[in-house]
Amino acid sequence: MPINYWTEQEDLLLKENYSTSSYSEMLLILPNRSGSSIYNRALKKFRLKKDASVVKLNRESRWRYYRNREFFSIPNTLNSYWAGFIAADGYIDTKCSKVSIMLAEKDRGHLDRFCKDVKYEGPIRTRIGSGFSADSKYAVLDVCGVRSWVDDLDRHFNVGANKTKILRPPNIFEEDLVKAYISGYIDGDGSIGVYSREYGSNGKDYSCVSISIVGYKPVLSWIKGWFDSWAETNRKKKSGVVKSRSQYRYSVNGARAESIINKMLGVDVPRLCRKWEPSINFMVSKGYNIDYKFYSV
């Protein structure tokens, strides 16, 4: 991952505006920088301090954006979906009680949907030059001051600050909640698609649906257990969780994948259209009776 160095222009904007601008204003002035990055650069590099009036303003308006603090308090299908998504593709900061999600710009609509579901009125920022490409464009959402979210995500779903090192299965047992959680996890760290390949001696084209998920072994083994219960197989050797370089992967293909997808579609959650729609269209063409309306792009 390339290092996102500060530019001379960014340093100039920081020195000109930091002392007299609020935290929210600085995020707009430096859209490619997080609040902690701005604070550390100002303090450690330039020893900048804020005027007393700005400090007071920050204290008064620090958490000025409304959000439903109790959103994750009682597990349901909607918050289980988003918990799965955050488990796969989010970041938890326990020190400042912050939940962050950064997606490719093409998936900004999914962050819009999350804001709508949790009733968050704050901005979604655009960041350039982060990730695996210096020219990549991302949509970034930081929801601060949500200690209740941090506690509830940890208590009900085992999603915490150290999820990048170890992630455990959620503490949910109702089947619909499990379907919702796994759907969210797939949208964050999985793929669903229709793949074609030549099959047989005559080279006939064969198309099938495939589900592939990456992550930590305990969670993938838990997902595999549910998949096996939803779509049994007569094969002596079932597909398993395998290690691929520094991470684990679990995949299901063909008729079993179709049965699992059909099962998960039984819960109404805001899945990513671009991931699910191709497989659903393929399944409908084979005779599946599916009438699912997507929430997100």
Image (cartoon, rainbow, N blue to C red):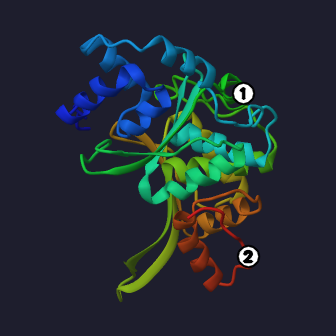
| Residue 172 screen position, x and y as percent | 76, 36
Q: Quadrant of the C terminus?
A: bottom right
- Mark 1 and mark 2 lie on one chain; the one further toward the N terminus is 1
Q: Quadrant of the N terminus?
A: top left
Residue 37 vertical placement versus 239 (above, below): above
Label number found at residue 290: none
Residue 296 vertical placement versus 246 (above, below): below
- Residue under label 2, please give it: 291
Label 2: state its secondary structure. Answer: loop
- Check disc 2 and give the amino acid type: Asp
| Residue 59 screen position, x and y as percent | 59, 17
Residue at the farthest front position? 53
Q: Nearer the viewer, residue 21 or 38?
A: 21
Relative horizontal placement of residue 15, taking residue 193 as reference (left or right): left
Relative horizontal placement of residue 186, taking residue 67 as reference (left or right): left
Residue 291 location, quadrant: bottom right
| Residue 171 screen position, x and y as percent | 73, 31
Disc 1/disc 2 C-alpha distance (Å): 33 Å
Q: CB under 8 Å between callouts 1 and 2?
A: no
Residue 230 location, quadrant: bottom right
- Check disc 1 and give the amino acid type: Asp
Residue 240 vertical placement versus 282 (above, below): above
- Residue under label 1, please give it: 152
Q: Which marked residue is nearer to the observer: mark 1 or mark 2?
A: 1
